Amino acid sequence: MSSLIDPDLLFPVDERTRSVARSLYGEVRNLPIVSPHGHTDPRWFAENQPFPDPAQLLIVPDHYVFRMLFSQGVRLEDLGVPTVDGTAVETDGRKIWRRFAEHFYLFRGTPTRMWFDYVLSDVFGIDKPLTPANADAHYDSIAASLATDAFLPRALFERFNIEVIATTESALDDLRWHKAIRDSGWTGRVITAYRPDSVVDPDFDGFHGNLDRLGEITGCDTGSWSGYLDAHRARRAYFKGLGATSSDHGHPTAETANLSDSAAAQLFDRVRSGKAEPGDAALFRAQMLTEMAKMSLDDGLVLQIHPGSWRNHSASMFARFGRDKGFDIPTRTDYVAALKPLLDRVGTERNLSVILFTLDESSYARELAPLAGVYPCLRLGPPWWFHDSAEGMRRFREMATETAGFYNTVGFNDDTRAFPSIPARHDIARRVDCAFLARLVTEHRLGEDEAREVAQELAYTLAKKAYRL
Amino acid sequence: MSSLIDPDLLFPVDERTRSVARSLYGEVRNLPIVSPHGHTDPRWFAENQPFPDPAQLLIVPDHYVFRMLFSQGVRLEDLGVPTVDGTAVETDGRKIWRRFAEHFYLFRGTPTRMWFDYVLSDVFGIDKPLTPANADAHYDSIAASLATDAFLPRALFERFNIEVIATTESALDDLRWHKAIRDSGWTGRVITAYRPDSVVDPDFDGFHGNLDRLGEITGCDTGSWSGYLDAHRARRAYFKGLGATSSDHGHPTAETANLSDSAAAQLFDRVRSGKAEPGDAALFRAQMLTEMAKMSLDDGLVLQIHPGSWRNHSASMFARFGRDKGFDIPTRTDYVAALKPLLDRVGTERNLSVILFTLDESSYARELAPLAGVYPCLRLGPPWWFHDSAEGMRRFREMATETAGFYNTVGFNDDTRAFPSIPARHDIARRVDCAFLARLVTEHRLGEDEAREVAQELAYTLAKKAYRL
Amino acid sequence: MSSLIDPDLLFPVDERTRSVARSLYGEVRNLPIVSPHGHTDPRWFAENQPFPDPAQLLIVPDHYVFRMLFSQGVRLEDLGVPTVDGTAVETDGRKIWRRFAEHFYLFRGTPTRMWFDYVLSDVFGIDKPLTPANADAHYDSIAASLATDAFLPRALFERFNIEVIATTESALDDLRWHKAIRDSGWTGRVITAYRPDSVVDPDFDGFHGNLDRLGEITGCDTGSWSGYLDAHRARRAYFKGLGATSSDHGHPTAETANLSDSAAAQLFDRVRSGKAEPGDAALFRAQMLTEMAKMSLDDGLVLQIHPGSWRNHSASMFARFGRDKGFDIPTRTDYVAALKPLLDRVGTERNLSVILFTLDESSYARELAPLAGVYPCLRLGPPWWFHDSAEGMRRFREMATETAGFYNTVGFNDDTRAFPSIPARHDIARRVDCAFLARLVTEHRLGEDEAREVAQELAYTLAKKAYRL
């Protein structure tokens, strides 16, 4: 543990509870990292080339970082965020780094601050917090580290004690980097996950072309409903061949449908032929979740649903900077009516695993825990995105545990492409869970021996079980 | 207090606050139980026969228990839950009990775990937590107890120090068991409550036949609006005669209506004649809440509204196992628009008492506390169902008190048919309230003498006042 | 600090955390009060006449007070609340005061209780809590104080250490009292704010006459869209001349629109000519928020949006007692879709400041923090109305900080017309913020030096910056 991260970080201040938390944490802190869902780039591990400069590694691609600076008047161009049309942006990593350092105080009280301190100290061995005054020195120190073999992607993977990490690839991806990793002889376990949004969502940019491409790749007739479904089956099998144990679906809502085969085929025909009526796109997405669940029954892939983000909320920012630029805003999300069609079809299957996520915390106690607490196919994913935070994780345990228990949850997802922050994220989750368990112990709601078992499950075992790893 | 329940259960760990909590709790822990709303079976107290085997008593009828096991892959048949069509299910109590014991770890962190430990230790005098290894011994021990006079329903009622308990009966119930209790000379106070859903909700199974039956019972013409209302008046009077002080209404939403008499009569005619239009069923339920409120003005029955549960969410499970099998899921519930028609009609009446419940905690601070904090007829029921839990009760006090105060709440409801757990449930509510009050005291927000008064009100007095007991 | 308010009020009980909280608070407790949004009467400061009797000052105008008593059966007439039609109500201040004293226990656990104790002790130097027994003595003591020069409005203003206070005036107000203050030579800084609801909301009582009047005052043609907009520009300039730095908008929802100029003009014509179609009133309000934002870009006024209150929920109480009588109930409020049109138009402007408020706490983490954490024009107003409370402020920090940080919030608003309670309200906000920061410190999430800086910002600096004071 380094000087920027206190050994008691996030533990309850009461000495008795803190002492229990320390003890529980002591037994899980060094467990291997199981990262069953995230967005790291498999190319890193395939090529094992040095990471770029500190700003390109830690600032430019991190939407948590640049959205906060943008909210306080810093232009994305000045942070090096690339434009869609190639208009020039800042390319001097050092200048970007200085701008970040000047605004670092904005992150007080946020998880980004905690992750950043952790990366500085634990990954790069820097023991002074970032300030405008030491920005250059820190930059140089990190840049020097990145040039060494110890900071190559595979070396970090091993140092981070990652047992397995899942990336996420589009249904159309050729998975070349995953093949390259497999062919390289390196033993790090990097697996893919099947993300078919681009060929499932009629509102996705280039949907029709994507379906044509899906047909080419698979040799299936994606002009027909049955050929289209076969194409999915083929791609899922291909993804499984490169380690995938799950599919992942990012939809605006959690709506599902349970149409008859003929109604589904007619819907597909309308959507595919460009004759979609209002509501058809949403209905098609909804039906496809159920189709995916049915395929999961056959091939065993775990189904993840990540609903409720209003993507690209600012049209002008989307036009200038493209997707994933901090303008995805959570929305109120219903699950009870939305999931019923899927649950009516497959809800009581005991060999199906559907993991639900939310950006709407009001659904934890009201909808998600009651659903997961009875339907055998349902599990609750960990707090996601803006809620992947100390307070967010605490609220999740407080609101979900009493109805769903611990064992209908699936451990932690880091869900990130910020590779250096992965140990920080898992460590914080382990700390928050141990803090929660410690409170249960000191309030005499759980025996300490039981808490010890649960801590182990939350930090390691449940993720492996739920994701079939 | 037994060995499975720590004397400091649920008290804040900070020693100063814990000490205040202990002191407050010490003065309320032995107060009689007032149970103004629940689902125990009056037949138990009428016949005073031994309870059945441990599994039939504690596992088979408890939806909290079997829904959790089902969520983790245990079949309801294997837990002895009876099927609608009579297909055979497990009948061996010991086998059911063992299955439960094997899965008991699933309940860590849940209220069920706390209630169960409490029942084991306080009711049955068992001082070892349930494990697969001791499952048989515990089973035998409980079975032996149940065969003794000390565990007959009336003996437990007295040992539990129940001052009064309300059951809930359908409007069509003949209340024979309540009459039998009254006629028996036993002095335990077991009263009924008027639950007319089956004759108020046009979507209820057998609604038309139910109305015919209502007419037969009362001698009123339930083919006409005025006769139908008279029939309700007659039944309410009959229920009052057997102790009822309240009616109870389980509706999908909190919607109310305030139709003119002629519009209401026309609506009734459409509903009664099978010519209901879309929306009529909901409108009829809505209007009936207002009609019940108007009758309450006359006969003094307290009106309870329990809205927002999506009953029987799984059609297949409903078909196989029937109602109340753990597939009732909370939904987002509006109160501000929904209650306005009723409140426009009777909201400022000072002799009316309407008790509002919710399964949507987001309404506590936003809607329910502001409404109850101004309308004289409104009171807030305690946290209900999935929220009848330590964290749920804490959130209720934290979110409702600042706007509604303590005195617009009504104390605790156990709302259960799990008779042996009633002392546990009331004890937990008393502990959580004392813990909340203790924090107010140590944060200097309330004097300790005042906290003492409030603790008494929350544990005992408010329930008697609000339910007119 | 007086005897009714403990020096450690609202600080966490844990000694280490409490000690940090004390230390942080010690440095901000005596900072001047910046009150950028509220409802005090400028006439008080213009005329500097004694406040009326204790009941007329502290009970009769305070909706927090009389709504709670009404909820428990006290008639508003008996509390001296004036009727619309002039029907006589209680005028004897002492009797009103006694009624309040008899029911004072109802406020246990509420902010009103805390504010009242604070006012008693800190403003009036009374060191015994109010009881029915001492009600008369307290009344006499307060009345005696009010008759002295030290309790005149300007003297209290100075004693309260108010650096600046904003009142809120209708767009049609002549601001005579503000002019009188300015002309008086008194140096207290009392500024106005532009509240145009009465000429922006077609559903407002007297809307058409209000527009006529707006035309007369400004000499603009409020029969045309362009003249109407010019009239707003003229009034905003006039308000700015009397110190205004902000406008304020109380709408039923947060809906905004971004119509073309011609569509907006046509909408105005329909609304102005009495030919409004269903939805036009809402659309007009929505469009006007965007128009106001565009004007803010020109004149620099900060735009405040206070949405989501269902005003005058009880028609009968509104008919008898008029507006602002405790019958305004929060409703579920959407921001993500609602604000998009305005944000599409001006959302990325860095010279615009839009401050968002809510009565729907479920939007903090889900919608408001994510929006304010990326759009440079957005800031989050403090917890409002029912949520201006210790628990409400704590929840706000816990739910908003991790995504929006501290620096996208704007410090505290007292938002009150209860002048004597202003120091109490600011003091409580400072205490709660210091308590929250102290927890971050003892959980090692923030350095104590940083917490010290943030405490200063939250208590003083952010309000000045955000409101351009």
Image (tube, coloured by chain):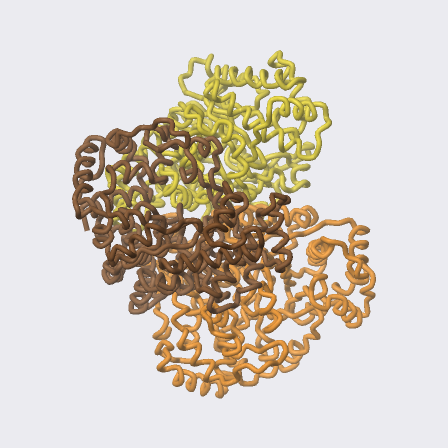
Chain colours: A yellow, B brown, C orange
Q: Residue at x 69, y 73 (%)?
A: C173
Kindly indicate the quadrant of the structure image that contains residue A35.
top left
Query: Does C166 appear above or below A434?
Result: below
Check the picture and name the quadrant holding the C terminus of chain A. top left
Relative depth, front residue between C335 and B5: B5
Please say if C20 is above or below C321.
Answer: above
Q: Is residue B265 left or right of residue C110?
A: right
Question: Which residue is found at the position 74% from the left and 54% from the top?
Answer: C280
Residue C239: horizontal and vertical position, in percent?
69, 69
The spot of residue B271 in percent (x, y) is: 59, 47
Front-most of residues C206 and C291: C206
Q: Quadrant of the N terminus of chain A?
A: top left
C106 in relation to C126, above or below: above
Where residue B438 sits in the image (x, y, percent)? 31, 60
Asked if one can make out residue A100 in the rendered structure from this viewpoint, the answer is no
Q: Position of residue A250 (x, y in %)?
A: 55, 32
Q: Nearer the viewer, residue C330 or C459?
A: C330
Left or right of C11: which side holds C324?
Answer: right
| Residue depicted at 76% across the width and 69% down the height | C209
Query: Is residue B269 in view from this perspective?
Result: yes
User: In the depicted view, which residue is nearer to us: C318 or A320?
Assistant: C318
